[in-house]
Amino acid sequence: MRYFIELAYNGTKYHGWQIQPDAVSVQEKLNKAISTVLQSKIEVVGAGRTDTGVHASQMFAHFNTEVPLGDHLTHKLNSILPNDIAVAKVFEVPEEHHARFSAESRSYEYRIWLGRNPFLLDFSWQIHSHKLELSKMNAAAILLLEYDDFQTFSKVKTEVHTFNCDVTAAVWKQEGHLLTFHISANRFLRNMVRAIVGTLVDVGMGKITIEEFRQIIESKNRGNAGLSVPAKGLFLTQIKY
């Protein structure tokens, strides 16, 4: 039988989602917790791979088992998992459902705090001395919906077969000192959101124009794009199936 797990995590202490040698990952912690509760070796498959320090307010993973799950599985998992990983629910799905390949869209948020806030150090990129022009950043962001090749914003060394993504939403919103970038697509390349945000911030600071942002997209050259902003401001917020 196949089961989905919905969970959330604070990525500050983890080297991303995926298991890797000599580094602590969210996937590793989840595997150990489920295997302990079910007394059977379980390996979960995630809906995607968040990088080191990136957070998730909604993540899904699946696993297969013939072991009866019993009652209170969610409570038992949460009692074993570290406090910075929380399981929302576990539910049975058809055998063909896949946490990664069945996902139709994913949404991320990137959070910038304009000023200083000691309570948000791990959950935002804090810009102390610059004023950002939100209208220009949104005018540039909407251009992303016109393109499907995002090689410009991908890590140079990557094993993907295509740089094509269908971006369906890209918008900045501001509430007081908090500036949040919302972006949705069918898939994302490694480092894509953080590179897009860095380039849009360059627009907001007046370092590049909106037309130059378009030219950067069309160049398909990572060297032309802005910096990769800190991971701590990035959240995987929604996965739709």
Image (cartoon, grey):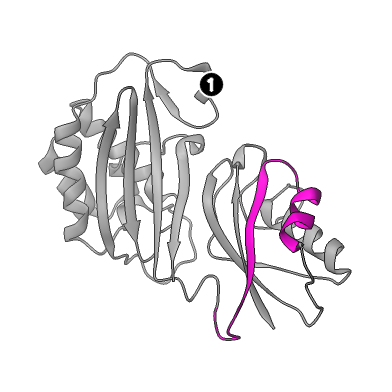
Tag 1's secondary structure? helix
Residue 91's spot in the image, x, y percent? Answer: 63, 71
Q: Identify the residue at image location x=67%, y=47%.
A: 85
Q: Where is residue 120 in the image (x, y as percent from the top left)?
A: 50, 25
In this rendering, position of residue 91 left or right of residue 48:
right
Q: In this view, does 82 lie to the left or right of 202?
A: right
Give 4 or 222, whichever is nearer the viewer. 4
Q: Is residue 234 found inside the magenta-colored segment of the image?
A: no
- In the rendered structure, the answer to whether residue 101 lies left or right of residue 80 reads left
Q: In this view, does 61 lie above or below 51?
A: below
* Quarter of the figure that contains the C terminus: bottom left
Foreground: 51 or 207? 51
Asked whether residue 190 appears in the rendered view, the answer is no
Q: What residue type is labelled 1?
A: Phe
Residue 86 in magenta stretch: yes
Q: Where is residue 68 in the image (x, y as percent from the top left)?
A: 80, 78
Residue 17 in which image quadrant: bottom right
Where residue 92 sits: x, y (%)? Answer: 63, 77
The residue tagged 1 is 119
Please rate how many residues cluster around mark 1, counting C-alpha atoms within 10 Å: few if below 14, some from 14 to 19, many from 20: few
Which residue is drawn at the image coordinates 51% and 32% (left, top)? 123
Provide the residue span drawn in magenta: 73-97
Looking at the image, can residue 87 be seen? yes
Going by the picture, which residue comes out furthest to the front?
71
Q: Residue furthest left?
A: 211
For the residue pair 59 and 88, the one nearer the viewer reads as 88
